[in-house]
Image (tube, grey):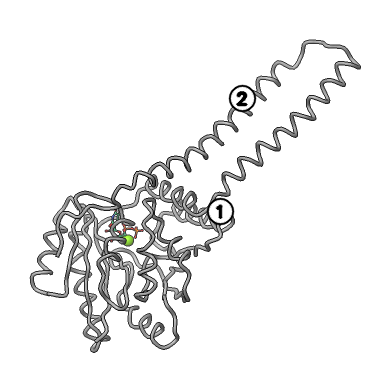
Amino acid sequence: MEKISIIVPCYNEEETVALFYQEAERVKEQNFPNVAFEYIFVDDGSKDRTLEEIKKLAKTDETVRFISFSRNFGKEAAMLAGLDSATGDYITLMDADLQDPPALLRKMYDMIKQEGYDCIATRRVTRKGEPPIRSFFAKCFYRVINHISDVQMVDGARDYRLMTRQMVDNIVSMREYNRFSKGLFGFVGFKTKWIEYENVERVAGKTKWSFWKLFKYAIEGITAFSTTPLLICSLIGLLFCLIAFFIILFIIIKTLVYGDPTSGWPSLVCIIFFVSGVQLFSLGIIGQYLSKTYLEVKHRPIYIVKEKK
Ligand code: UDP
Ligand code: MG
């Protein structure tokens, strides 16, 4: 019998874990009579009763497994832990809040089986229920990253996807510390089909992403999948050298023709401010890459497991 592993990262999801399990079981009973399920709930250092809720499910159902982290390591780490320990032939990642409808699973499974895809990925076509400012910045991010990165990232892409064993093996073989899965999925390649659905709002609880957290995540995506910002710094430097060269020529000629009246202090101050601003900005970009490199070379564990079943 074939097996599907369902990985569910959970951070403070005490209200949604049981609801998620009910819905997934319903889908299993209705649509998957001949396929086994394996649930892997990853408790990402929750501060509420999430782990207790998961343990309750694990007691009554032997297909429910869990991994509990020693602290909050982030959704990326939780997804990796799940992928590391999944034993299924097909593996899927789903949010605990039912924003990734388990009901789509049958359609995804059929596509993999019949149409020969390695991965069925989902994207939401609407961002209903999301603050407009967040949608706006998300759109900007995708526009920028797709211009400057070789790996294509799809706007509205969810982490919800069904993948073959082979694809997952390749994803977990990449042990980078600064993980940006949306890019990693694209990087490994394989035949991927995108299916679309309308955004669903979470059943209970609150989103874990603050604006600041998302901003840092976006920077992570850019530094992990593009070195174009570094190139831009070099080009700006080159441009400034050229401009300086012409200004020097201009001043020499002007001095020879008109003499040397001491004027131009305000413009000089402006230029100093502008140039040092550009320098600091460029240094900051280099610093971003350096700090990511620093974190990589330390080879710290991506997550630490406290308890598992
Ligand atoms: N999540 C996690 N660790 C975190 C933040 C979130 O495991 O540090 C999980 C969370 O429990 C949920 C999923 O990631 O199952 C998506 O989070 P959320 O619904 O808050 O994000 P959104 O859907 O608003 O993008
Ligand atoms: Mg959600």
Q: Which quarter of the image is occupied by the N terminus? A: bottom left
Judge by depth and name the residue closer to the eye, 35 or 303: 303
Q: Which residue is mark 1?
A: 144
Residue 304 lies, in percent from the top left, at 22, 52
Using the image, tell me which numbered label, if any, was put on residue 308. Answer: none
Tell me the residue that label 2 is attached to. Answer: 273
219 or 155: nearer the eye? Answer: 219
> At label 2, which amino acid type do we have?
Phe
Q: Nearer the viewer, residue 65 or 295?
A: 295
Q: Residues within 10 Å of mark 1 (few under 14, many from 20)?
A: few
User: 10 Å neighbourhood of mark 2: few (<14), some, or many (≥20)?
Assistant: few
Q: In which image quadrant can residue 108 be found?
A: bottom left
Alpha carbon separation for disc pair 2 and 1: 27 Å
- Asked whether the beta carbons under mark 2 and mark 1 sit within 8 Å of each other, the answer is no
- Identified by mark 1, the residue type is Val
Q: Is residue 86 above or below residue 232?
A: below
Residue 227 at x, y percent in the picture: 55, 49
Judge left or right: residue 234 versus residue 28: right
50 horizontally vs 132: left or right: left
Quarter residue 170 falls in:
bottom left
Name the residue rendered at 69%, 20% in the picture.
Answer: 268
| Residue 264, position as x, y percentages in the image | 74, 17
Q: Secondary structure at mark 2?
A: helix
